[in-house]
Amino acid sequence: MPARSFRFACLGLIVIAGLFAFLAAAEVRDTMTHSRWLQHDKERPKPPVVEPAASPAGAPAPKDAVILFDGTNLDVWRTPEGGPAPWKVAEGFMEVAPGTGPIETKAKFGDVQLHVEWASPSPPVGKGQDRGNSGIFLMGLYELQVLDSYRADTYADGQAGAIYGQYPPLANASRPPGEWQMYDVAFRRPRFDKDGKLLEPARITLVHNGILIQNNEELWGGTNWLESAPYEAHGDRGRIELQDHGHPVRFRNFWVRELPERPAPGADYPARPQTVSLAAAELDSLTGQYAMGRRKDAKPATISRGDGHLLFKMASRPRPLVMLPISPSEFVLPHTDARFTFQRDDQGRVTGVLFRVGDGEQLLTKIP
């Protein structure tokens, strides 16, 4: 190939390579969410230090709790391969056996309330992330950082109480190394549809030593080091894992409560009665002031007509409530299991209305 042609070919390859590099960098930039800090950024503001109250003695677990460690054995734990948990048990605590690897619960959990107490080694050894490091992985995927962050410096989203790589704690509530720390956690697992599409992200609330440091935070995927990984569909239950990061961190008083789904009404839930149309004159016959209760100083309620509806206004509420008719004498509220039944005398004049809601009822007497 002539030298000139060779030079042009090389130049073309360089331009093409540069174009691909530019496009690749642009793609990376496009996939980043600019409202987020870069993971593990040392310049990310550190949370303020808040001194917690004195460490209380370990309170007993609730009666419905699943005990994950009772201070005597590791029977509910295993290695990821299914073997016996090799960590140390002594004097009411379990301790990471550095180099033996993580341990995980034999049972799987979904939504949970979790309580655990942990202590980093004393005297402290190392700095940054190499200081009393461990972690609690909910469903094996979502890490709450365990670290000696007492008068120690590291990146904000890696401090004690961080949702690792995503959310720093709102405060550094760490006690000195060797003292027992408390985590109280509310975890709501992510929800996926039958095709694996994310319906609802995971959420975590965390109280560290009595101080709220994660306030119902919405995770954007599994927690990871050096990458921000999107959600991958998984089951409704997963194991709780404790990390071996090479430090003899201790754990005690470890329990969870499984949280039920809130019941939703089924297909057989009673339908609301159909509303009916009433003439303006019929509605006007029900308006007026009604005495509430037996106290003489109680301010009356007012029933008026507006926008084609009856409106129920109590003195204690700033806005009136719309009353929907289901018969000439019965009305309901749109979103509440409440019912008004108007009463009349022998001459057809309204004398009062019986107001029922929940398990209570009250007769409101019409004021002449």
Image (cartoon, rainbow, N blue to C red):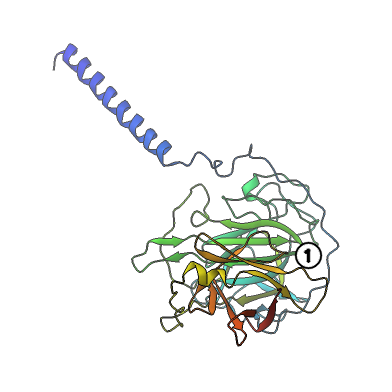
- The quadrant in which residue 31 appears is top left
Residue 192 position within the rendered picture, expressed as x and y whole percent measured from the top left: 41, 65
> Residue at the front extreme?
347
Residue under the image location 51 percent in, 47 percent down: 226
Residue under the image location 35 percent in, 29 percent down: 22
Instruction: Please say if 264 is above or below 203.
Output: below
Q: Amino acid under label 1?
A: Trp
Residue under the image location 33 percent in, 66 percent down: 195
- The quadrant in which residue 188 appears is bottom right
Give the SS element for disc 1. loop
For this rendering, which residue is in front, 195 or 306?
A: 306
Instruction: Please say if 18 is above or below 115.
Output: above
For this rendering, which residue is in front, 101 or 148?
A: 148
Instruction: Please say if 275 is above or below 306.
Output: below
Looking at the rendered image, the quarter that the C terminus falls into is bottom right
Looking at the rendered image, the quarter that the N terminus falls into is top left
| Camera sees residue 142 | yes
Residue 344 position within the rendered picture, expressed as x and y whole percent measured from the top left: 60, 83
